[in-house]
Image (cartoon, helix red, strand yellow):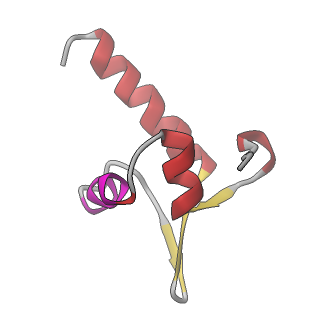
Amino acid sequence: EDFQLESKYLYSVAEACYLLSMSRSSLNRLLKANKIRSIKEGGMRRIPATAIEQYIKQTSKATMKGV
């Protein structure tokens, strides 16, 4: 599947997993630890594009520092 980060504001959990190249259980751990923000409306959880970008930036900085 082809996802376009620049054209959407909110992503499903499955789309976020694809974009971050991680399993659903890994993403769920990050959500529970508040390392990635999400929005829940009704029974649906959505991850904002800004939250995905922020997580990537934070992870990249931590990796560069050797953390």
Residue 15: quadrant of the picture: bottom right
* Vertical placement of residue 18 versus 67, above or below: below
* Vertical placement of residue 32 versus 62, above or below: below
At horizontal 43% and vertical 38% (from top left) the residue drawn is 55
Q: Residue furthest left?
A: 67
Tell me, yes or no, if residue 16 can be seen here.
yes
Q: Tell me the quadrant of the picture where the C terminus can be found.
A: top left
Magenta region, residue range: 25-32
Q: Tell me residue 47's x, y (percent).
A: 54, 59
Comparing 45 with 26, the one in front is: 26
At horizontal 71% and vertical 55% (from top left) the residue drawn is 9
* Vertical placement of residue 24 versus 49, above or below: below
Q: Tell me residue 54's x, y (percent).
A: 49, 37
The reply, left or right, for residue 32 in relation to residue 61 is left
Comparing 1 with 52, the one in front is: 1
Q: Residue furthest front?
A: 1
At horizontal 55% and vertical 89% (from top left) the residue drawn is 42
Comparing 59 with 19, the one in front is: 19
Q: Residue furthest right?
A: 7
Q: Tell me residue 22's x, y (percent).
A: 41, 45
Tell me, yes or no, if residue 47 can be seen here.
no
At horizontal 49% and vertical 51% (from top left) the residue drawn is 17
Q: Tell me residue 52's x, y (percent).
A: 52, 44
